[in-house]
Image (cartoon, rainbow, N blue to C red):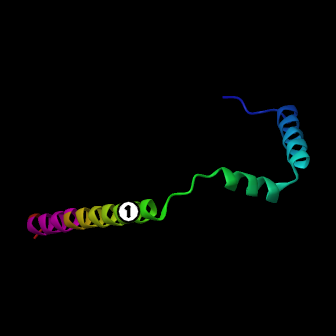
């Protein structure tokens, strides 16, 4: 695996600086990118949030159950 040379990194950074300066800077670029985002509807946001909360709760319950089972099993084996 090779690492980039100083010539490679300086060429990329000068190109990035030139592009950023030509378009107006960080804040206008950020605003332009946020305009391109497809924001979810309220219904979609609510339903997907509920799905995430349910999946996290189910995963936590599963991990807790497995942990308790192995704790119980190890207490039976190592009395």
Instruction: Using the image as rendered, state which of residue 41 and residue 61 is in the foreground.
Output: 41
Q: Residue at x 30, y 67 (%)?
A: 57
Residue 68, quarter of picture: bottom left
Task: Locate residue 47: give its quadrant.
Answer: bottom left
Q: Nearer the viewer, residue 7 or 38?
A: 38
Q: Is residue 10 above or below residue 26?
A: above
Tell me what residue is drawn at x 42 percent, y 63 percent. 43
Residue 15, compared with residue 34, is above or below; it is: above
Percent x, y of residue 70: 18, 63
Outermost residue toward the top in this view: 1
Instruction: Identify the residue shown where x is 45% and y is 62%.
Output: 45
Compared with 7, 33 (above or below) is below
Left or right for 7, reference 68: right
**On screen, residue 64 above or below 19:** below
Horizontal relation, residue 41 to residue 11: left or right: left
Residue 48, magenta (yes or no): no
Front residue (pair 70, 15): 15
Label 1 SS: helix
Dominant SS type (magenta): helix
- Alpha-carbon neighbours of circle 1 within 10 Å: few (<14), some, or many (≥20)? few
Q: Position of residue 39 (x, y in %)?
A: 56, 57
Residue 46 is situated, as x and y percent measured from the top left of the image, at 41, 66
Q: Which residues are magenta?
A: 66-76
Q: Quadrant of the C terminus?
A: bottom left
Image spot of residue 74 (x, y percent): 15, 65
Q: Which residue is mark 1?
A: 47
- Was residue 71 drawn as part of the magenta stretch in this picture? yes
Q: Quadrant of the N terminus?
A: top right
Among the 4 quarters of the image, the one containing residue 30: bottom right
Query: Is residue 10 shown left or right of residue 59?
Result: right
């Amino acid at each position: 695996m090779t690492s980039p040379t100083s010539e490679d990194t300086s060429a990329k950074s000068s190109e990035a600086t030139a592009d950023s300066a030509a378009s107006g800077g960080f804040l206008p670029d950020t605003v332009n990118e946020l305009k391109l985002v497809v924001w979810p509807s309220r219904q979609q946001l609510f339903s997907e949030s509920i799905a995430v909360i349910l999946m996290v709760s189910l995963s936590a319950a599963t991990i807790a159950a497995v942990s308790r089972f192995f704790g119980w099993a190890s207490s039976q084996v190592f009395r």
